[in-house]
Image (cartoon, rainbow, N blue to C red):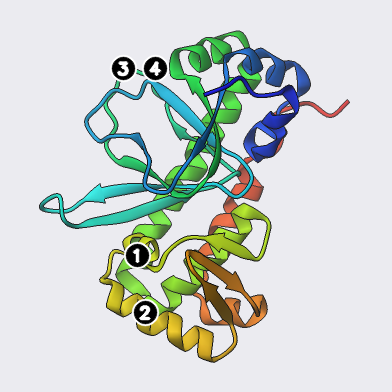
Amino acid sequence: MSLPLAGELIQNRLLAQLRDDDRSRLAPHFHRFELEANHVLQKAGEDVEHTWFPCGSALAAFSIWIDDDDHSVEVGVIGNEGAVGGIVSNGHIPAYATALVRSPGKFLRIRTSALEQAKLDSIALRHWFSRYSDCLLAQIFQTAACNATHTISQRTAKWLLAGIARTQGKEIAMTQENLAQLLGVGRTFVTRVVHKLRDEGLISTRRGVFVIEDEEALRKRSCPCTALIEDHFDTVLHGIYPVD
């Protein structure tokens, strides 16, 4: 754990779009962490004491456990466009989902109580995070519909596209086991889909990394869910600050 430099806050796009005075209001309360895959950010049933902001290529995911501790389904992936934790609550409400690191990297952490105080001091901050919570809920709604409707192949393409959209590159640090957990299916299903995508030249792989080789072709293979969510983000997360 260490204190971030002021410029590091803009490595998270949700923070980067804040006005300088609002970002400065939050900056002293952040700490920097370098986290590995599968690190637990919050556990279901525990109070949400911290809010985490992925930076750069880091990814987190919300996981819902089904029936027992051996099977879970991912219901949302969060990268440098968003945050995990006490976005709306005041930090004394238990988390419903477990949040895990899915792609390793830098995370900025702030106590939710400090974030709440900053939102009381700035109505723009309060509105900004309320709008983000709407976008996050929309993503979870769309994921539920996607899981019930689309094929494993379509959903694999969707998650890979979502990964590069959040990391702003062509590589995603993620194992096939992690991808299977995102999809809520066994690894053997994912292995077959990955082999097919690789044989067709859409992706390549190396240990713990997916590389997108043909993004346009992968988009044709994907369901439309990622584009729908991106459109919603673009619509909702605008207009907080007045135009000078």
Residue 231 visible in the current orientation: no
Mark-to-mark CA distance, 4 and 1: 34 Å
Q: Residue at x 59, y 87 (%)?
A: 201
Q: Which residue is mark 1?
A: 177
Residue 164 x %, y %: 61, 61
Q: Disc 3 marks which residue?
A: 92
- As drawn, which residue projects farthest toward the bottom? 200
Earlier-in-chain disc, 1 versus 2: 1
Say if 106 sits above or below 222 in the image.
above
Identify the mark nearer the N-term, 3 or 1.
Answer: 3
Q: Nearer the viewer, mark 3 or mark 2?
A: 2
Quick one: label 4, few (<14), some, or many (20+) residues within 10 Å?
some
Report the Cα–Cα distance between label 3 and label 1: 33 Å
The kind of residue tagged 2 is: Thr
Q: Quadrant of residue 192?
A: bottom left
Residue 143 appearing in the image: yes
Q: In the rendered structure, are the residues bearing label 4 and label 3 in contact, judged by CB atoms less than 8 Å apart?
A: yes
Q: Earlier in the sequence, mark 4 or mark 1?
A: 4
Q: Residue at x 68, y 60 (%)?
A: 169
Q: Amino acid at mark 4?
A: Asn
**Between marks 3 and 2, how big is the CA–CA gap?**
41 Å
Q: Which mark is residue 90?
A: 4
Where disc 2 sits, the SS reads helix
Which residue ends up furthest to the left in the rendered image? 67
**Residue 234: where, in percent of width, then height?**
66, 49
